[in-house]
Image: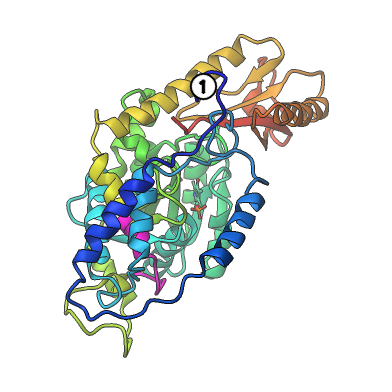
């Protein structure tokens, strides 16, 4: 934003879109001409401008002063590639529906797998992290049909529900004062037996805490459970160069888990919906086996539709991801990795500022790019009220934060043992934008 100037969306790149559409058109120029559906510009214009008005009723998610929920504007290259692909509107349910975009999906997903250290894998894109976790736990349930699913009390709320859908028992594991899965509590539960799968969250949604994967892997050696890593929000941080040692060590061991979920529509610069599920053992493909009489004609290879629970999926999402990774390869020290370093650096700066401000109590140092803090007050309920007021006042000044209810022990300041069950409304900021 220029000084004193008003905010402007990027419109300059629309010229590139026209050029690319014309290039794409040329590939189909041998087809006989046909009359495309009539475009009534006047009527469409009226509706479109009405939509533009309706869209005013949004928080300015794309603006730096929106630092609340986990929202990040897609990169222009993703937006343009998605729009370009929409003129074909491929469906990645099978090669019949989207040949080019299926190949691009396989390439893009293989690059994500390589980022985690896997040369071989089975995986594909999904509509989002929830569907991706559903598939990972579905496979886990096929392999451990009688086993309980364990995840930390700070794991994403959908794991409990997904387990319900899959008719698998679910239990949550307490967290330590950094909102990470408590290894002692995990081992206590493992000793009781019956655990099939443990979900480690690398980057919790509320606080960006990273579960202690090296310790969890040690327990796996002894207790032989299946291990799934939910990295929907945090996964790309494997590329960052400024993580504290516990988070670094956790990301460095990701290659040893059985399955991974990551959301390109969170930190990967993609529009919704783009999630991704990866399995280390390609052999789990056998669980997806099904007979569809009408979708697979054109190839004997394993199609994406044969290794996905969803049938129709947006080929445009794969095209957008492929284009983005072409521009920003998923490598350490690259431009994309630098963006993540900046997000974490911003979170550390905010955390330091809050720690030096008497009005607030900051939680533990952020491991990724989410900062949580409370308003200093005599009681937790007073603190919660003040947080809500601060949130509303900030929003009126176009500074957008988020609220979260978290265990009060994350904010313990003195040595007296905090009430393990007390919670408090805190302020939360996700600093995931440039
Ligand atoms: C966002 C998130 C999910 C859910 O993903 P959606 O893309 O919103 O469906 C799951 N787990 C974690 C850790 C998340 O941050």
Which sits in the foreground, 96 or 117? 96
Q: Which residue is mark 1?
A: 365
Answer yes or no: is residue 85 visible.
Answer: yes
Q: Quadrant of residue 361?
A: top right
For residue 216, above or below residue 425: below
Is any part of residue 192 visible from this angle? no
In the image, residue 312 lies in the stretch drawn in magenta: yes
Near-viewer residue (305 or 151): 305
Residue at left offset 17%, top offset 79%:
299
Nearer to us in this view, 74 or 150? 74
Q: Is residue 205 above or below residue 362?
A: below
Quadrant where the C terminus is found in the figure: top left
Residue at the spot x=23%, y=67% of the render? 283
Q: Does residue 136 appear to the left or right of 1 in the view shown?
A: left
In x, y percent, where is residue 410?
62, 28
Q: x%, y% of residue 371?
A: 56, 27
Instruction: Read off the magenta span.
Output: 308-319
Residue extending farthest front: 42
The answer to whether residue 387 is above or below residue 60 is above
Circle 1 — which element?
Answer: loop
Residue 182 in the image: x percent, y percent?
51, 37
Q: Position of residue 324 (x, y in %)?
A: 30, 46
Q: Quadrant of residue 356?
A: top right
Residue at 47% in and 22% down = 346
Q: Residue at horizontal 33%, vertical 69%?
A: 90
Rendering colour mode: rainbow
Q: Is residue 242 above or below residue 25?
A: above
Q: Is residue 138 magenta?
A: no
């Amino acid at each position: 934003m220029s000084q004193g100037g008003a905010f402007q969306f990027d419109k300059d790149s629309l010229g590139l879109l026209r050029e690319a559409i014309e290039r794409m058109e040329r590939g189909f120029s041998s087809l006989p001409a046909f009359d495309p559906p009539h475009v009534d510009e006047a009527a469409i214009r009226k509706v479109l401008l009405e939509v533009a008005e309706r869209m005013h009723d949004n928080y300015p998610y794309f603006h730096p002063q929106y630092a609340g929920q986990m929202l990040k504007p897609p990169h222009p290259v993703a937006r343009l590639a998605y729009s370009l692909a929409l003129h074909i509107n491929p469906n990645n349910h099978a090669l019949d529906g989207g040949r080019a975009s299926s190949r691009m999906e396989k390439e893009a997903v293989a690059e994500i797998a390589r980022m985690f250290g896997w040369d071989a894998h089975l995986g594909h894109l999904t509509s989002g992290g929830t569907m991706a976790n559903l598939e990972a736990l579905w496979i886990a349930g096929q392999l451990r049909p009688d086993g309980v699913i364990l995840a930390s009390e700070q794991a994403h709320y959908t794991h409990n529900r997904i387990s319900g859908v899959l008719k698998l028992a679910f239990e949550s594991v307490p967290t330590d004062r950094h909102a990470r899965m408590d290894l002692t509590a995990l081992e206590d539960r493992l000793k009781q037996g019956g655990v099939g799968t443990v979900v480690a969250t690398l980057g919790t949604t509320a606080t960006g805490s990273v579960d202690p994967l090296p310790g969890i892997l040690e327990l796996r050696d002894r207790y032989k459970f299946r291990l799934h890593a939910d990295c929907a929000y945090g996964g790309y941080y494997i590329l960052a160069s400024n993580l504290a040692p516990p988070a670094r060590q956790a990301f460095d061991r990701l290659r040893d888990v059985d399955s991974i979920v990551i959301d390109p529509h969170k930190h990967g610069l993609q529009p919704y919906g783009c999630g991704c599920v990866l399995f280390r053992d390609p052999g789990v493909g056998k669980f997806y086996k099904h007979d569809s009489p009408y979708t697979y004609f054109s190839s004997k290879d394993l199609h994406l539709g044969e290794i996905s629970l969803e049938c129709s999926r947006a080929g445009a999402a794969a095209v957008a991801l492929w284009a983005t990774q072409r521009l920003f390869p998923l490598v350490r020290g690259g431009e994309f990795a630098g963006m993540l370093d900046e997000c974490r650096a911003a979170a550390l700066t905010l955390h330091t500022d809050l720690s030096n401000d008497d009005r607030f109590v900051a939680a533990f140092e952020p491991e990724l790019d989410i900062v949580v803090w409370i308003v200093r007050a005599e009681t937790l309920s007073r603190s919660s009220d003040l947080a809500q007021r601060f949130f509303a006042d900030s929003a009126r000044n176009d500074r957008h934060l988020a609220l979260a209810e978290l265990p009060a022990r994350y904010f313990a300041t003195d040595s007296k043992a905090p009430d393990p069950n007390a919670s408090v409304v805190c302020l939360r900021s996700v600093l995931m934008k440039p």
